[in-house]
Every structure is written in structure tokens, then in C-alpha cells.
Image: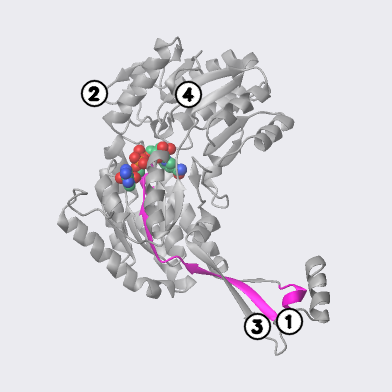
Amino acid sequence: MAETAESLQITPATSGRIQEIFKKQHGHQYTVARTTARQRIEKLRRLHTAMIRHRSAIRQALAADFRKPAEETDISETAYVNTEIRHTIRHLARWMQPRRVGVGLSLLGSSARVIYEPKGVCLIIGTWNFPFNLNLVPLIAAVASGNCVILKPSEHAPHSAALIEKILRECFREEEVAVVQGEVEVARQLLQLPFNHIFFTGSTSIGKEVMQAAARHLASVTLELGGKTPVIVDETADLDRAASRIAWIKCLNYGQTCIAPDHVLVHESVHDALVGKLKEWLQKYYGDTPEARRQSPDLARVVHDRQFRFLLDLKANAVDLGAKVAFGGEFDPAERFIDPTILTDVPPEAKIWEHEIFGCLLPIKRYQTLDEAIEYINTGSKPLAFYIFSNRERHIKKVIRETRGGGVCVNECALQFFNPDLPFGGHNASGIGKYHGDSGFMEFSNARSIARQHSSYPTTNLFLPPYGSRLMKTLLNWLVRWL
Ligand code: NAD
């Protein structure tokens, strides 16, 4: 049953504005679809320039939202968005070309090609943790594919959401790209509309709601979801390299990253050495004492109280059940500060093994054989990302072959995200569909098959009724076996 503005608790003005934008975009979609590669590139260039013009405002917005360090903002937001734009500009004309495909002997005289047409009017619902990256990278793909877009950024990063709206207003007209800000109710109102494609980034549980809503109109979906990202460190790994990367990417964005190492599975023979190295790197990066780390300008903060309490509870539950705090452990609710924390000897029944952590808590688990580590990973849902640190090729191949999920990165963390030539996305509980580079272009396009008959004596003449002639029987025997 359709919900009304009243039952969704949004103002009639917001509801009216949503309807009006959708109607405008619906009417304008064929004009946008007809644009050439050159015209679309022009729009992307405007966005590229705006990102550079607003670089310091982007830093300020993220600092205001959750004290994100400026350098991390440059690396993970502004620079990546602009990398994606430049990559798209370089390749768009080729991606837009129709693709000729062959015809078999039985279809001789015809031709076939695939054209990539825009899906139409698309909805992007984004999350707060990398607001520019996770809202604008899908937008780049949608614009490159010739779609109209309504974008709803997350309410949990309000300064970023306001700046995204400002930037997009400077670059696009509302009948092509519009931003609608608001909370869950606004997202739910948007989901009632018959969009042609819905691109959602967020938690797995909300992803299911989005897919249900999409089903009402049979809209296609891209779901970029979460989950637990395991790291394997085997007995041949360069422990110093492993620790330096795990500590960095775990604490980047204060652990609030969908591809951050969630937990580490380490061979028992190098467990203590790895924990020692992790401590060293955390101290090198952020300071020797909890107080120094609290003062560090390189650590952000937990985004909201709910997440802070969740992390506090995960740690307390693990410790109550017998886990050891090998490093960190201090929490300050006033600042939503959590000292980066390493937990060892965490019992299997602890809640931290069940939930995506999404914060600077790092539980470490020993394994004796690689098969045991692989079996443990395969009992959970398919992860969005997976890391292995090893110098034994056989181990690397085995782990990749015997596990399932989104991307894999070997002897580093997060590289798989930053290469626009690699499709990014999960599988099943960690997501549906892929984007970045040409994968994003394809995700927002409908691959339309065009078959064309050229022959005055088409081969299909041979198969017209009435059936049963000797010639047809011979031809069918050929067709079934050879053609
Ligand atoms: P969330 O699912 O709570 O919210 C995401 C967006 O959905 C927000 O814009 C929010 O307003 C909207 N929303 C919330 N409830 C809704 C509902 N009932 N119906 C429709 N829309 C609704 O997620 P979050 O807490 O903002 O983000 C954290 C999660 O996102 C983590 O699980 C993380 O792993 C995941 N994530 C995934 C990726 C990825 O690329 N796969 C990237 C970042 C974060």
C-alpha cells in the first residue's frame, strides 16, 4: 500500500517538491539521453572544476561532520572523485559506442549489435562515511550514461550533504540532477516513485528494504552494502608491511569504512609478533599514549552516539567473556573518542564476531591451518572485501579460489577500491551489482540488442510452417548438431 506524506511524517512541501522534481526529470529524460559523449564530458568537466574549487570547503564539511582529517578527505574523497571523472572523460566515447557482435551461419544475412541506452530516471541513496565519494562516483556513472538523477545524501553528515547540494546546483539543472536532503522518511517517500534504477549504499538490512521497494516497480538495483572484511596473515607474510597497512586502513575514517579490515586471522606462529608490530605502527601513526592519540589530528571521531554505544558494547561484551585488551581500550563518550583497540583471545561467542564493527576495534584470532581460516571465513556471509598478507603463492591462490565475495587485495589494503578499472561491489549480503569505471557506465545503462535482417532471402524462410518437409528435417538435424 502506498504511504502518504502524512504517514511518512514528511511535510507536504517536501513531498510536493519530490513529486515535482521527479515529474520534471521524467519529462526531460529523453533530452538528456540524446546528449553526445562530448556534451556529457562537458558536464563532468564542470564537476571536476567544482571539486577543485571547493576542495577546502569539502575538508571543512567533513571536519565538521566527524572531525575527518583533511589529508584523508583529499585522499579518499576529492582525489578519488576526480580520478573517476578523468577516467570517465578519457574512455566515455568508446564506452558509448555500439558493440557489433557476430551472427552464426543460421542467421546469415543479418547483422547484430548492442547499444547502451540510459536507464532513465535514477535514484541514488548514499551513506555518510565517504559522502562525496559514495554519492558522486555513482552520479558520475549515471551522468556519463545519460540519465537523470535524484540524489539523497545521508542525514548523518549534514555539512557534507549541504555542500553536495550546493556543488551539484552549480553544475546541473534540476531537471537533470537534483539533491533532496532529509532523513529516513524522505528516502522512503522517494522509494515510492517509479524510478528506472535505484543505487543504494548503506547497511545490508536497509538494502533489503530498498530492494523490496524497488520490486514494486521492478526497478533495477545496485546495492552497495556492508559486512565483515576479514584479513588473513599467514606465517610467510612480511609482518611489518602487514601491520602498517592493517593499522592504517583500520583507523582511516576512524574505522568507519566498508572495506576496512574488520578482524584478523593470523597463523598462530606469528600471532604475538603481529600484535607487537600493530602496536608499534599505531603508536608511530597516532602517538605513544592514549592522551597523545586523543590529541592526534589524524584520527576522526565516531559519527553518532548510537554507533559509539554499539562499539562500547562490543568491546565490553568481548572483555566480559575473557578477551584481552592488547592495546588501547579507552573510550570517551564526550568526544566520541575510542582509543584504537586490539583485542586478542576473544571467545567465539563474543558479539564482535557477529556484527560488522565499523570502528577502531580490531579483534585478532589465531589459526593453525589455512583450511581452518578459510572454513571460518566461509561460515559467514560473503565479504565486500578480503585481504591476504602472504609470500607463498600457493596460499594466495588457494585463499582466492576457496573463498567468495567482492574484491580481494593481496599484501596491501584497499587498493582494489582505488583502481577505476576494477569493478567495485559485493555479492549477496555484501551487495548486488558493480560500479567504478566502465562497470558503473554499464550499471546505469540498459544493454539493448539490435538485430537487423538485410537479406532478401533470409535463412528464416527455411523454417516457416507448415513444418515436416524432408528439407526441414535435414536442416533441423544440422541446426541441432552443428549450426
Ligand atoms: P544506513 O543503511 O543506515 O543508511 C544509508 C542511507 O539509507 C541513508 O541515506 C539513510 O537516510 C537511508 N535510509 C536509512 N533507513 C532507510 C529506510 N528504511 N529506507 C530507505 N532509506 C533508508 O547505513 P549507514 O549507517 O549510513 O552506513 C553504514 C553501512 O553502510 C555499513 O554497513 C557499511 O558497511 C555500509 N557501506 C557500504 C559501502 C559500499 O560501498 N558497499 C560503503 C559505505 C558504507
Question: Which disc number belongs to residue 459?
Answer: 1
- Distance of label 1 from label 3 (alpha carbons): 10 Å
Amino acid marked by disc 1: Thr
- Specify which label sits upstream in the sequence, 3 or 4: 4
Amino acid marked by disc 2: Ala
Label 2 sits on residue: 334
Question: Which disc number belongs to residue 353?
Answer: 4
- Specify which label sits upstream in the sequence, 2 or 3: 2
State the residue at coordinates (83%, 80%): 470
User: Which quadrant does the C terminus fall into?
Assistant: bottom right
Question: Which disc number belongs to residue 25?
Answer: none
Amino acid marked by disc 4: Trp
Label 3's element? strand
- Distance of label 2 from label 3 (alpha carbons): 72 Å
State the residue at coordinates (35%, 32%): 300
Label 4 crowd bin: few (<14), some (14–19), many (20+), radius 10 Å: some
Q: Is residue 44 left or right of residue 433?
A: left
Q: Quadrant of ligand 1?
A: top left
Q: Quadrant of residue 391?
A: top right
Asked if residue 240 shows in the view, the reply is: yes
